[in-house]
Image (cartoon, rainbow, N blue to C red):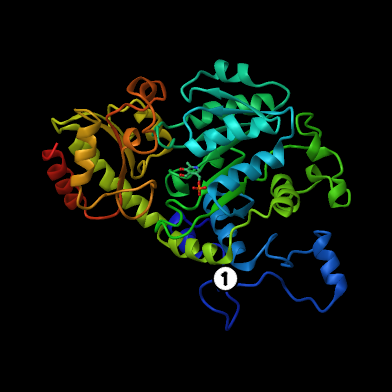
Amino acid sequence: MKDHIETLCVQAGYRPATGESRIPPIVQSTTFFYGDSQAMADLFDLKREGFFYSRLANPTVDALEKRIAALEGGACGIGCASGMSAVLLTAMTLCQAGDNIVTASEIYGGTFNLFSTTLPKFGISSRFFDVDASAEELEALIDERTKFVFAETIANPAVAVADLEKISAVCKKNGVLFIVDNTLATPVLCRPLAWGADIVIHSTSKYMDGHAAALGGMIVDGGTFAYKDNARYPSFNAPDESYHGLVYADLPVAFGTKCRAQMMRDTGAVMSPQNAFYTLLGSDTLALRMERHSRNAEKIAAFLCAHPKIEWVRYASLPDDRYHALAEKYLPDGTGGMMSFGIRGDVKACARFMEHLRIATQETHVADVRSCVLHPASTTHRQLTDEQLIAAGIAPNLVRLSVGIENADDLIADLEQALAAV
Ligand code: PLP
Protein backbone atom coordinates (compact mmCIF):
# COMPACT_ATOMS: atom_id res chain seq x y z
CA MET A 1 0.00 0.00 0.00
CA LYS A 2 1.40 3.39 -0.98
CA ASP A 3 0.70 6.37 1.23
CA HIS A 4 -0.33 9.71 -0.23
CA ILE A 5 1.89 12.78 -0.07
CA GLU A 6 -0.08 14.35 2.83
CA THR A 7 0.53 11.24 4.94
CA LEU A 8 4.21 11.04 3.98
CA CYS A 9 4.76 14.70 4.94
CA VAL A 10 3.73 13.89 8.51
CA GLN A 11 4.78 10.26 8.94
CA ALA A 12 7.76 9.45 6.70
CA GLY A 13 11.33 9.32 7.93
CA TYR A 14 10.97 8.42 11.58
CA ARG A 15 9.16 5.76 13.57
CA PRO A 16 9.95 5.58 17.29
CA ALA A 17 10.48 2.33 19.16
CA THR A 18 8.55 1.81 22.41
CA GLY A 19 9.32 4.55 24.90
CA GLU A 20 11.23 6.74 22.44
CA SER A 21 10.28 10.32 21.71
CA ARG A 22 7.37 10.61 19.27
CA ILE A 23 9.05 13.27 17.19
CA PRO A 24 12.66 12.86 16.03
CA PRO A 25 14.99 14.08 18.77
CA ILE A 26 17.82 16.52 18.02
CA VAL A 27 20.85 14.27 18.32
CA GLN A 28 23.37 16.99 19.05
CA SER A 29 26.46 14.81 19.00
CA THR A 30 29.40 14.73 16.63
CA THR A 31 30.18 11.12 17.36
CA PHE A 32 28.66 7.77 18.44
CA PHE A 33 29.75 5.07 20.84
CA TYR A 34 30.67 1.49 19.85
CA GLY A 35 31.85 -1.11 22.36
CA ASP A 36 32.82 -3.56 19.66
CA SER A 37 35.56 -2.72 17.18
CA GLN A 38 34.30 -5.15 14.53
CA ALA A 39 30.94 -3.35 14.49
CA MET A 40 32.77 -0.11 13.82
CA ALA A 41 34.92 -1.67 11.09
CA ASP A 42 31.74 -2.97 9.41
CA LEU A 43 30.33 0.56 9.37
CA PHE A 44 33.45 1.86 7.64
CA ASP A 45 33.21 -1.00 5.11
CA LEU A 46 29.55 -0.07 4.45
CA LYS A 47 28.63 -3.64 5.51
CA ARG A 48 26.11 -2.34 8.03
CA GLU A 49 24.18 0.89 8.48
CA GLY A 50 24.70 3.14 11.45
CA PHE A 51 26.16 6.38 12.69
CA PHE A 52 29.76 7.01 13.55
CA TYR A 53 30.44 10.67 12.84
CA SER A 54 27.91 13.43 12.11
CA ARG A 55 29.83 14.75 9.11
CA LEU A 56 28.73 11.56 7.35
CA ALA A 57 25.41 10.74 8.99
CA ASN A 58 23.37 11.82 12.00
CA PRO A 59 20.04 10.41 13.25
CA THR A 60 18.13 13.73 13.06
CA VAL A 61 19.46 14.52 9.59
CA ASP A 62 18.75 10.89 8.63
CA ALA A 63 15.06 11.31 9.54
CA LEU A 64 14.79 14.32 7.22
CA GLU A 65 16.74 12.54 4.47
CA LYS A 66 14.35 9.59 4.66
CA ARG A 67 11.32 11.89 4.70
CA ILE A 68 12.29 13.91 1.62
CA ALA A 69 13.44 10.76 -0.22
CA ALA A 70 9.99 9.26 0.48
CA LEU A 71 8.23 12.45 -0.67
CA GLU A 72 10.18 12.45 -3.94
CA GLY A 73 9.90 8.66 -4.41
CA GLY A 74 13.70 8.28 -4.38
CA ALA A 75 16.13 5.72 -2.95
CA CYS A 76 18.02 7.96 -0.53
CA GLY A 77 18.53 11.56 0.55
CA ILE A 78 21.70 13.43 1.48
CA GLY A 79 21.24 16.41 3.81
CA CYS A 80 23.48 19.37 2.96
CA ALA A 81 24.30 22.67 4.66
CA SER A 82 22.36 24.69 2.05
CA GLY A 83 20.76 24.39 -1.36
CA MET A 84 23.96 25.68 -2.94
CA SER A 85 26.06 23.01 -1.25
CA ALA A 86 23.60 20.39 -2.55
CA VAL A 87 24.18 21.62 -6.11
CA LEU A 88 27.95 21.82 -5.59
CA LEU A 89 28.22 18.33 -4.05
CA THR A 90 26.18 16.88 -6.90
CA ALA A 91 28.51 18.45 -9.48
CA MET A 92 31.61 17.33 -7.55
CA THR A 93 30.34 13.75 -7.30
CA LEU A 94 29.92 13.57 -11.06
CA CYS A 95 32.46 15.88 -12.68
CA GLN A 96 36.17 16.42 -12.91
CA ALA A 97 38.29 18.89 -14.90
CA GLY A 98 37.50 18.58 -18.59
CA ASP A 99 33.85 17.61 -18.05
CA ASN A 100 30.84 19.78 -18.80
CA ILE A 101 27.31 20.45 -17.56
CA VAL A 102 24.38 21.21 -19.86
CA THR A 103 21.98 23.48 -18.01
CA ALA A 104 18.87 25.56 -18.60
CA SER A 105 19.72 29.26 -18.39
CA GLU A 106 16.52 29.97 -16.45
CA ILE A 107 17.86 28.92 -13.04
CA TYR A 108 18.49 30.48 -9.64
CA GLY A 109 21.21 33.18 -9.78
CA GLY A 110 23.46 31.40 -7.26
CA THR A 111 23.41 28.19 -9.29
CA PHE A 112 23.99 30.22 -12.45
CA ASN A 113 27.11 31.79 -10.86
CA LEU A 114 28.38 28.39 -9.71
CA PHE A 115 27.99 26.91 -13.20
CA SER A 116 29.12 29.93 -15.21
CA THR A 117 31.95 31.35 -13.05
CA THR A 118 33.13 29.14 -10.20
CA LEU A 119 33.15 25.62 -11.66
CA PRO A 120 35.00 26.76 -14.82
CA LYS A 121 37.88 27.80 -12.52
CA PHE A 122 38.17 24.09 -11.69
CA GLY A 123 38.01 23.03 -15.33
CA ILE A 124 34.29 22.15 -15.38
CA SER A 125 32.46 24.12 -18.07
CA SER A 126 28.76 24.75 -18.64
CA ARG A 127 26.64 24.97 -21.75
CA PHE A 128 23.38 26.87 -21.42
CA PHE A 129 20.10 26.16 -23.18
CA ASP A 130 16.88 28.13 -23.27
CA VAL A 131 14.42 26.09 -21.18
CA ASP A 132 12.07 26.23 -24.19
CA ALA A 133 14.73 24.79 -26.57
CA SER A 134 13.74 21.90 -28.81
CA ALA A 135 14.97 18.36 -28.14
CA GLU A 136 17.35 18.73 -31.12
CA GLU A 137 18.84 21.98 -29.81
CA LEU A 138 19.35 20.41 -26.40
CA GLU A 139 20.87 17.23 -27.80
CA ALA A 140 23.36 19.25 -29.88
CA LEU A 141 24.94 20.52 -26.61
CA ILE A 142 25.62 17.05 -25.19
CA ASP A 143 28.99 15.44 -25.90
CA GLU A 144 30.93 12.52 -24.39
CA ARG A 145 32.19 14.71 -21.50
CA THR A 146 28.69 15.90 -20.49
CA LYS A 147 28.00 14.54 -17.01
CA PHE A 148 24.49 15.87 -16.45
CA VAL A 149 21.67 18.00 -17.78
CA PHE A 150 20.15 20.42 -15.25
CA ALA A 151 16.87 22.35 -14.98
CA GLU A 152 14.50 23.75 -12.33
CA THR A 153 10.89 22.50 -12.29
CA ILE A 154 9.71 26.09 -11.71
CA ALA A 155 12.58 28.48 -12.36
CA ASN A 156 13.56 31.12 -9.81
CA PRO A 157 12.97 33.97 -10.68
CA ALA A 158 11.86 33.39 -14.30
CA VAL A 159 8.82 31.29 -13.18
CA ALA A 160 9.31 29.18 -16.33
CA VAL A 161 8.15 25.55 -16.19
CA ALA A 162 10.58 22.93 -17.57
CA ASP A 163 9.27 20.28 -19.96
CA LEU A 164 10.60 17.41 -17.85
CA GLU A 165 9.55 14.58 -20.17
CA LYS A 166 11.13 16.22 -23.21
CA ILE A 167 14.44 16.83 -21.44
CA SER A 168 14.46 13.38 -19.88
CA ALA A 169 13.89 11.71 -23.28
CA VAL A 170 17.02 13.44 -24.65
CA CYS A 171 18.99 12.38 -21.56
CA LYS A 172 17.85 8.77 -21.76
CA LYS A 173 18.72 8.61 -25.47
CA ASN A 174 22.26 9.81 -24.66
CA GLY A 175 22.75 7.84 -21.41
CA VAL A 176 23.27 11.05 -19.44
CA LEU A 177 21.87 11.98 -16.02
CA PHE A 178 18.98 14.42 -15.73
CA ILE A 179 19.06 16.48 -12.52
CA VAL A 180 16.16 18.68 -11.42
CA ASP A 181 16.08 21.39 -8.77
CA ASN A 182 12.56 20.96 -7.38
CA THR A 183 12.77 23.69 -4.72
CA LEU A 184 9.87 25.88 -5.84
CA ALA A 185 7.50 23.10 -6.91
CA THR A 186 8.21 20.76 -3.95
CA PRO A 187 7.18 17.08 -4.21
CA VAL A 188 3.67 18.12 -3.20
CA LEU A 189 3.13 19.79 -6.58
CA CYS A 190 5.51 17.78 -8.79
CA ARG A 191 7.71 14.69 -8.42
CA PRO A 192 10.39 14.95 -11.12
CA LEU A 193 11.63 11.35 -10.65
CA ALA A 194 8.25 10.17 -11.93
CA TRP A 195 8.81 12.26 -15.09
CA GLY A 196 12.24 10.78 -15.85
CA ALA A 197 14.67 12.79 -13.69
CA ASP A 198 17.46 10.75 -12.05
CA ILE A 199 18.41 13.04 -9.17
CA VAL A 200 16.40 15.79 -7.44
CA ILE A 201 17.86 18.72 -5.52
CA HIS A 202 16.23 21.02 -2.97
CA SER A 203 17.06 24.18 -1.19
CA THR A 204 15.16 23.13 1.95
CA SER A 205 15.59 26.74 3.11
CA LYS A 206 12.46 27.54 1.06
CA TYR A 207 9.03 25.80 1.17
CA MET A 208 10.38 22.59 2.73
CA ASP A 209 11.15 24.43 5.98
CA GLY A 210 8.61 27.11 5.15
CA HIS A 211 9.39 29.40 8.06
CA ALA A 212 12.66 30.97 6.88
CA ALA A 213 14.17 29.49 10.04
CA ALA A 214 16.78 27.03 8.75
CA LEU A 215 19.17 26.91 5.82
CA GLY A 216 19.52 23.51 4.24
CA GLY A 217 19.79 21.46 1.09
CA MET A 218 18.84 17.95 0.06
CA ILE A 219 19.96 15.67 -2.75
CA VAL A 220 17.62 12.78 -3.56
CA ASP A 221 19.03 9.93 -5.61
CA GLY A 222 16.37 8.12 -7.63
CA GLY A 223 18.64 5.08 -7.51
CA THR A 224 17.70 3.72 -10.94
CA PHE A 225 20.31 5.20 -13.32
CA ALA A 226 22.52 2.55 -15.00
CA TYR A 227 26.14 3.57 -14.34
CA LYS A 228 27.51 0.04 -14.85
CA ASP A 229 29.77 -0.01 -17.92
CA ASN A 230 28.44 3.40 -19.03
CA ALA A 231 31.60 4.93 -20.58
CA ARG A 232 30.37 8.41 -19.65
CA TYR A 233 30.90 7.65 -15.93
CA PRO A 234 34.39 6.12 -15.48
CA SER A 235 34.59 7.28 -11.85
CA PHE A 236 31.62 5.03 -11.03
CA ASN A 237 33.18 2.02 -12.76
CA ALA A 238 36.78 2.20 -11.53
CA PRO A 239 37.74 1.24 -7.93
CA ASP A 240 37.79 4.24 -5.55
CA GLU A 241 41.24 3.91 -3.98
CA SER A 242 40.25 6.46 -1.32
CA TYR A 243 37.52 4.05 -0.23
CA HIS A 244 39.42 0.76 -0.24
CA GLY A 245 38.64 -0.09 -3.85
CA LEU A 246 34.85 0.35 -3.79
CA VAL A 247 33.24 0.33 -7.27
CA TYR A 248 30.17 2.55 -6.94
CA ALA A 249 28.43 1.19 -10.06
CA ASP A 250 28.21 -2.20 -8.30
CA LEU A 251 26.15 -0.77 -5.45
CA PRO A 252 22.34 -0.52 -5.38
CA VAL A 253 22.43 3.27 -4.78
CA ALA A 254 25.56 4.28 -6.68
CA PHE A 255 25.30 8.07 -6.77
CA GLY A 256 24.01 8.47 -3.21
CA THR A 257 26.80 6.30 -1.80
CA LYS A 258 29.54 8.05 -3.81
CA CYS A 259 28.20 11.47 -2.89
CA ARG A 260 28.20 10.73 0.83
CA ALA A 261 31.23 8.43 1.15
CA GLN A 262 33.48 10.54 -1.06
CA MET A 263 32.24 14.11 -1.37
CA MET A 264 30.51 14.66 1.94
CA ARG A 265 33.51 13.06 3.62
CA ASP A 266 35.87 15.43 1.80
CA THR A 267 33.87 18.68 1.94
CA GLY A 268 31.92 18.40 5.21
CA ALA A 269 29.10 20.52 3.70
CA VAL A 270 26.61 18.70 5.91
CA MET A 271 23.27 19.80 7.37
CA SER A 272 23.28 20.40 11.12
CA PRO A 273 20.96 18.30 13.35
CA GLN A 274 19.33 21.50 14.61
CA ASN A 275 18.47 22.66 11.08
CA ALA A 276 17.25 19.17 10.17
CA PHE A 277 14.93 19.31 13.19
CA TYR A 278 13.44 22.68 12.19
CA THR A 279 13.02 21.45 8.63
CA LEU A 280 11.30 18.27 9.82
CA LEU A 281 8.82 20.38 11.80
CA GLY A 282 8.23 22.61 8.80
CA SER A 283 7.81 19.74 6.36
CA ASP A 284 4.99 18.27 8.49
CA THR A 285 2.72 20.96 7.03
CA LEU A 286 4.19 21.15 3.51
CA ALA A 287 1.14 19.70 1.77
CA LEU A 288 -1.25 22.09 3.54
CA ARG A 289 0.96 25.07 2.90
CA MET A 290 1.54 24.40 -0.81
CA GLU A 291 -2.19 24.21 -1.34
CA ARG A 292 -2.70 27.59 0.38
CA HIS A 293 0.27 29.23 -1.37
CA SER A 294 -1.14 28.14 -4.72
CA ARG A 295 -4.77 29.18 -4.05
CA ASN A 296 -3.66 32.58 -2.67
CA ALA A 297 -1.32 33.19 -5.61
CA GLU A 298 -4.04 32.27 -8.14
CA LYS A 299 -6.38 34.88 -6.63
CA ILE A 300 -3.63 37.50 -6.51
CA ALA A 301 -2.47 36.82 -10.08
CA ALA A 302 -6.07 37.27 -11.31
CA PHE A 303 -6.37 40.52 -9.33
CA LEU A 304 -3.10 41.88 -10.72
CA CYS A 305 -4.04 40.94 -14.31
CA ALA A 306 -7.17 43.05 -14.03
CA HIS A 307 -5.44 46.05 -12.43
CA PRO A 308 -4.89 49.11 -14.67
CA LYS A 309 -1.49 49.89 -13.11
CA ILE A 310 -0.12 46.44 -13.92
CA GLU A 311 1.44 45.93 -17.35
CA TRP A 312 1.95 42.16 -17.29
CA VAL A 313 1.90 39.18 -14.89
CA ARG A 314 3.90 35.96 -15.12
CA TYR A 315 2.39 33.06 -13.23
CA ALA A 316 2.02 29.65 -14.85
CA SER A 317 -1.45 28.96 -13.44
CA LEU A 318 -2.87 31.92 -15.42
CA PRO A 319 -4.74 30.55 -18.45
CA ASP A 320 -2.83 32.76 -20.92
CA ASP A 321 0.62 32.28 -19.40
CA ARG A 322 3.13 30.82 -21.86
CA TYR A 323 3.85 27.96 -19.42
CA HIS A 324 0.20 27.19 -18.67
CA ALA A 325 0.04 23.99 -20.72
CA LEU A 326 3.22 22.65 -19.11
CA ALA A 327 1.91 23.64 -15.68
CA GLU A 328 -1.33 21.74 -16.33
CA LYS A 329 0.70 18.66 -17.20
CA TYR A 330 3.39 18.73 -14.51
CA LEU A 331 1.76 20.82 -11.76
CA PRO A 332 -1.96 20.00 -11.92
CA ASP A 333 -2.60 20.96 -8.27
CA GLY A 334 -1.07 24.43 -8.49
CA THR A 335 2.16 26.28 -9.14
CA GLY A 336 3.00 27.60 -5.67
CA GLY A 337 3.39 31.17 -4.49
CA MET A 338 6.07 32.69 -6.75
CA MET A 339 5.14 35.16 -9.48
CA SER A 340 6.50 38.27 -11.14
CA PHE A 341 4.72 41.28 -12.59
CA GLY A 342 5.47 44.63 -14.19
CA ILE A 343 4.16 47.91 -12.79
CA ARG A 344 3.27 50.63 -15.32
CA GLY A 345 5.94 53.17 -14.51
CA ASP A 346 9.63 53.47 -13.78
CA VAL A 347 11.94 52.25 -11.06
CA LYS A 348 10.69 55.00 -8.71
CA ALA A 349 7.11 53.82 -9.16
CA CYS A 350 8.15 50.30 -8.16
CA ALA A 351 10.00 51.59 -5.09
CA ARG A 352 6.93 53.65 -4.08
CA PHE A 353 4.69 50.61 -4.46
CA MET A 354 6.92 48.44 -2.31
CA GLU A 355 7.39 51.05 0.40
CA HIS A 356 3.61 51.31 0.75
CA LEU A 357 3.04 47.59 1.25
CA ARG A 358 1.83 46.88 4.75
CA ILE A 359 1.91 43.05 4.78
CA ALA A 360 4.41 41.82 2.19
CA THR A 361 7.91 42.88 3.21
CA GLN A 362 10.95 43.57 1.03
CA GLU A 363 13.32 40.61 1.33
CA THR A 364 16.00 38.73 -0.56
CA HIS A 365 14.07 35.54 -0.01
CA VAL A 366 11.16 33.59 -1.43
CA ALA A 367 8.94 30.68 -0.50
CA ASP A 368 8.07 30.93 3.15
CA VAL A 369 4.81 31.46 5.01
CA ARG A 370 5.12 35.28 4.96
CA SER A 371 4.56 37.18 1.72
CA CYS A 372 7.59 39.04 0.46
CA VAL A 373 8.59 41.17 -2.52
CA LEU A 374 11.76 42.14 -4.26
CA HIS A 375 12.42 44.73 -6.93
CA PRO A 376 15.59 43.40 -8.61
CA ALA A 377 16.29 46.64 -10.54
CA SER A 378 16.65 48.68 -7.35
CA THR A 379 18.20 45.96 -5.15
CA THR A 380 20.02 42.83 -6.38
CA HIS A 381 20.65 44.29 -9.87
CA ARG A 382 20.80 48.03 -9.02
CA GLN A 383 24.26 48.52 -10.58
CA LEU A 384 22.85 47.75 -14.07
CA THR A 385 21.56 50.34 -16.57
CA ASP A 386 18.06 49.93 -18.07
CA GLU A 387 19.62 48.42 -21.21
CA GLN A 388 21.70 45.96 -19.16
CA LEU A 389 18.65 45.02 -17.11
CA ILE A 390 16.72 44.15 -20.23
CA ALA A 391 19.67 42.12 -21.57
CA ALA A 392 19.68 40.19 -18.27
CA GLY A 393 15.98 39.43 -18.73
CA ILE A 394 14.94 41.73 -15.88
CA ALA A 395 12.55 44.48 -16.91
CA PRO A 396 13.17 47.68 -14.88
CA ASN A 397 9.54 47.50 -13.71
CA LEU A 398 9.65 43.81 -12.67
CA VAL A 399 8.53 43.01 -9.14
CA ARG A 400 8.96 39.49 -7.78
CA LEU A 401 6.25 38.45 -5.34
CA SER A 402 6.36 35.38 -3.14
CA VAL A 403 2.82 34.89 -1.89
CA GLY A 404 2.55 33.58 1.65
CA ILE A 405 -0.25 31.83 3.51
CA GLU A 406 -1.92 34.95 4.92
CA ASN A 407 -5.57 35.67 4.07
CA ALA A 408 -5.79 36.30 0.30
CA ASP A 409 -8.27 39.17 0.70
CA ASP A 410 -5.92 40.92 3.13
CA LEU A 411 -3.04 40.52 0.68
CA ILE A 412 -5.14 41.86 -2.20
CA ALA A 413 -6.29 44.86 -0.13
CA ASP A 414 -2.66 45.55 0.72
CA LEU A 415 -1.55 45.37 -2.92
CA GLU A 416 -4.46 47.59 -3.92
CA GLN A 417 -3.60 50.39 -1.46
CA ALA A 418 0.11 50.20 -2.37
CA LEU A 419 -0.74 50.43 -6.09
CA ALA A 420 -2.97 53.44 -5.35
CA ALA A 421 0.13 55.21 -4.05
CA VAL A 422 1.97 54.74 -7.37
N1 PLP B 1 17.82 26.51 -5.84
C1 PLP B 1 16.82 27.39 -5.91
C2 PLP B 1 15.73 27.18 -6.91
C3 PLP B 1 16.79 28.50 -5.07
O1 PLP B 1 15.78 29.37 -5.15
C4 PLP B 1 17.84 28.68 -4.15
C5 PLP B 1 17.88 29.85 -3.25
O2 PLP B 1 17.10 30.78 -3.38
C6 PLP B 1 18.89 27.74 -4.12
C7 PLP B 1 18.84 26.65 -4.97
C8 PLP B 1 20.03 27.88 -3.17
O3 PLP B 1 19.62 27.51 -1.91
P1 PLP B 1 20.26 28.03 -0.51
O4 PLP B 1 19.93 29.49 -0.41
O5 PLP B 1 19.60 27.17 0.50
O6 PLP B 1 21.72 27.80 -0.62
Q: Which quadrant would residue 53 be assigned to in this image?
A: bottom right
Give the vertical position of 75 relative to 55 (above or below).
Answer: above
Q: Is mark 1 on a helix, strand or loop?
A: loop
- The amino acid type found where label 1 is placed reads Arg
Residue that carries the numbered disc 1 in the rendered image: 15
Q: Which residue lies furthest to the front in this view?
A: 383
Q: Which quadrant would residue 396 be assigned to in this image?
A: top left
Q: Position of residue 116 (x, y in %)?
A: 58, 29
Give the vertical position of 192 relative to 325 (above or below).
Answer: below
Does 152 sit left or right of 118 as displayed? left
416 or 219, nearer to the observer: 416
Q: Which of the image's four quarters has the C terminus?
A: top left
Residue 352 can be seen in this image: yes
Point 71% across, 28% down: residue:
99
135 or 121, nearer to the observer: 121
Q: Which of the image's four quarters has the N terminus?
A: bottom right
Residue 195 can be seen in this image: no
Q: Position of residue 204 (x, y in %)?
A: 49, 52
Does 242 sit left or right of 100 as displayed? right
Q: Residue furthest bottom?
A: 19
Q: Crowding at label 1, few (<14), some or many (≥20) Cα neighbours within 10 Å?
A: few
Point 20% across, 40% down: residue:
353
Q: Position of residue 408 (x, y in %)?
A: 21, 50
